[in-house]
Image: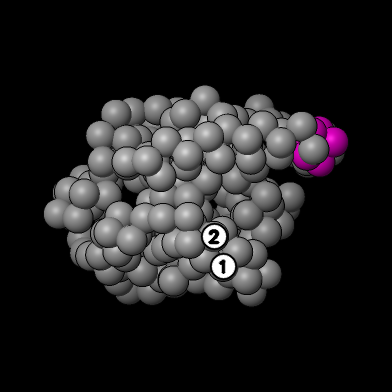
C-alpha cells in the first residue's frame, strides 16, 4: 500500500513532466493529423479503469472518421482501408498513445499497469477478475505489453496482468517501463487486422 501511494506520486510527476517537455511534439503530431485527413485530432473511447469504473481514454486519431465505432481494429475486415497514412506510423511507433499522459495526470491511468480494456471486452474483464487485475489503475504500458502485446490470447494476457499485480513494485515498474522502449523499437507483437485465426475466437480475441 505504501508503494501504491508513491506510485501515484511518480505518475503525477512523470506525466506532468512529459506534457511539459513534449508539448511541441504533441503540437506537431496534431498538425500533421489535421493536414493528413479530416476529423478531430484526438480519439476518445470508453475504457475500463480501476475497480471496473469507466473513463474516456485519449489517443491521437489514427483512423478515418467512418470507421465502425467501439470495435477493436483487429476485428475489422479491412483495417488497412480505415487506418490513415499518418496513423499507420503513429500506431507502429506508439506515438498515438501520448495523449494518455493526460489520463495519467488526471488519475484515470498509471504509467505502468494492465492495458485498459474496452468497455465491451467482457471476456478480458472477467479473466482479469480472477487475478485482481481490475483492482488497480490500468497503465500506458505493462507486463503483458512487453511480453506479447497484440499477439496474446485473452487468458494469457490476463495471467500476465496477474503476475504484475502479484509483483507490483518499483523494480517491476522499471522493468516494464524500460522494456517498453525495446518493444516499440522492434514493433514487437503489433498486429493490425485479422492476421491470426485466433482473433475471431472468444479466447483468442485481442485488445486494441
Q: In this view, does 101 lie to the left or right of 68?
A: right
Q: Which residue lies furthest to the front in this view?
A: 2
Classed neighbour count for the residue bearing mark 1: other residues with Cα under 10 Å, few (<14), some (14–19), many (≥20): some
Helix, strand or loop status at disc 2: helix
Does residue 158 appear anywhere in the picture?
no
Q: Residue 179 carries which label?
A: 1
Q: Nearer the viewer, residue 29 or 156?
A: 156
Kindly identify which residue carries mark 2.
Answer: 174
Q: Judge left or right: residue 85 versus residue 164.
A: right
Q: How far separated are the C-alphas under marks 2 and 1?
A: 8 Å
The part of the chain drawn in magenta is 22-27
The secondary structure making up most of the magenta span is helix
Residue 205 percent across, percent down from the top left:
30, 60
Taking the image as shown, residue 24 lies to the left or right of residue 126, namely right
Q: In which quarter of the image is residue 118?
A: top left
Dot 2 crowding, Cα within 10 Å, few <14, some 14–19, many 20+ = few
Amino acid at each position: 500500500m505504501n508503494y501504491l501511494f508513491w506510485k501515484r506520486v511518480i505518475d503525477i510527476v512523470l506525466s506532468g513532466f512529459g506534457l511539459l517537455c513534449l508539448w511541441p511534439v504533441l503540437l506537431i503530431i496534431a498538425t500533421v493529423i489535421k493536414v493528413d485527413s479530416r476529423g478531430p485530432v484526438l480519439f476518445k473511447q470508453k475504457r475500463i479503469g480501476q475497480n471496473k469504473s469507466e473513463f474516456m481514454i485519449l489517443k491521437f486519431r489514427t483512423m478515418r472518421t467512418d470507421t465502425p465505432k467501439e470495435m477493436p481494429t483487429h476485428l475489422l475486415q479491412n483495417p488497412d482501408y480505415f487506418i490513415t497514412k499518418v496513423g499507420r506510423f503513429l500506431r507502429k511507433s506508439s506515438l498515438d498513445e501520448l495523449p494518455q499522459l493526460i489520463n495519467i495526470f488526471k488519475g484515470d491511468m498509471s504509467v505502468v499497469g494492465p492495458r485498459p480494456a474496452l468497455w465491451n471486452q467482457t471476456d478480458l474483464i472477467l479473466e482479469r477478475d480472477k487475478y485482481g487485475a481490475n483492482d488497480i489503475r490500468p497503465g500506458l504500458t505493462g507486463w503483458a505489453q512487453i511480453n506479447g502485446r497484440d499477439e496474446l490470447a485473452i487468458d494469457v494476457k490476463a495471467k500476465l496482468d496477474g503476475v504484475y499485480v502479484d509483483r507490483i513494485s518499483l523494480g517491476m515498474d522499471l522493468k516494464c517501463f524500460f522494456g517498453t522502449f525495446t518493444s516499440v523499437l522492434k514493433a514487437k507483437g503489433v498486429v493490425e487486422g485479422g492476421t491470426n485465426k485466433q482473433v475471431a475466437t472468444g479466447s483468442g480475441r485481442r485488445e486494441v
